[in-house]
Image (cartoon, rainbow, N blue to C red):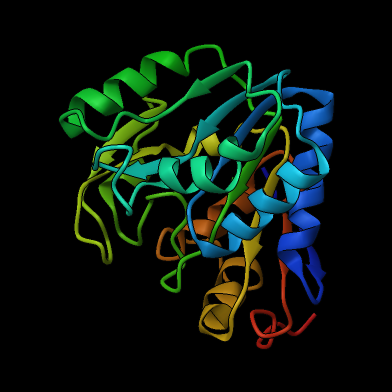
Amino acid sequence: MPASPPELHVVDDPAADVGRLLADQAARGGSIVLTGGSTPGVAYERAADLQPDWGRVDLWWGDDRCVPPEDERSNYRLARETLLDHLEDPPRTVHRIRGELPPLEAARELDEELAGVTFDLMLLGLGPDGHMASLFPGSPQLLVEDRRAVSGPAGLEPWVDRVTMTLPTIQAARRIVFLVAGEDKADAVFRAFEGDITAETPASLTRLAPVTVQIFLDRAAAAKLTQ
């Protein structure tokens, strides 16, 4: 399948734009996949303000660290503090990755839950090494095609095991959205969205999905793009 060019949105406040996307999707209902990080946290706060009723949403996480849900490193905790605790009507279902379990068990549980599921909106971040979810450059998890979720070691700090959706699961989403901010991401943005499509830059592999990937980023993160 030929890669489609990504849809780039260089804006002053990408978290605000993504917050509106999340709020709009929540109003329509469906399955939403969240990510971790400080910039998405701002987007979640905006989304909760704009749309406090998430009662038609099935909520998922693309990855999480193998820590209890109250741990400060937990992507679930971030979403709870910035989104879930501020909603008037909670999501219809919340599919938390149970990081307190042994990694293989948590991944197997998520894999089973994902059977037959297609996502309406997949939100992703971009690491400075080009990773997305917990799919890191050179990771054997990138090669998994017969499972929807896997576990594996971290490719950068914090050095705790991760559970992550696999590449085919991510590529099958109806809408794939990246939120990226900061000059420390500029090299990764260029490699992921203008450079070669390669497992050495895992985020670039989303460009092989059958949908156009949307990237919302600030000017600092976009500094090395040529288009």
Q: Residue at x 55, y 58 (%)?
A: 125
In this rendering, is residue 208 above or below 27? below
Please provide percent x and percent y for residue 178: 64, 56
Tell me which residue sits at (58%, 85%) in the image.
183
Q: Closest to the observer: 165 or 25? A: 25
Question: Closest to the observer: 149 or 21?
Answer: 21
Q: In the rendered view, does 187 fall on the left or right side of 64?
A: right
Please tell me which residue is depicted at 73% across the width and 83% down the height of the picture.
219
The quadrant in which the C terminus is found is bottom right
Q: Is the N terminus in the top left, top right, bottom left or bottom right quadrant? A: top right
Q: Nearer the viewer, residue 114 or 196?
A: 114
- Vertical placement of residue 121 versus 65, above or below: above
* Residue 185 to residue 70: above or below: below
Q: Quadrant of residue 159?
A: bottom left
Give the image location of residue 190, x and y in percent: 61, 77
Q: Residue at x 58, y 27 (%)?
A: 59
Say whether residue 3 is visible.
no
Instruction: Point out residue 225 in the picture as x, y percentages from the top left corner.
Output: 70, 82
Looking at the image, which is closer to me, 35 or 93?
93
Horizontally, is 142 left or right of 39 in the view?
Answer: left
Q: How many marks?
A: 0
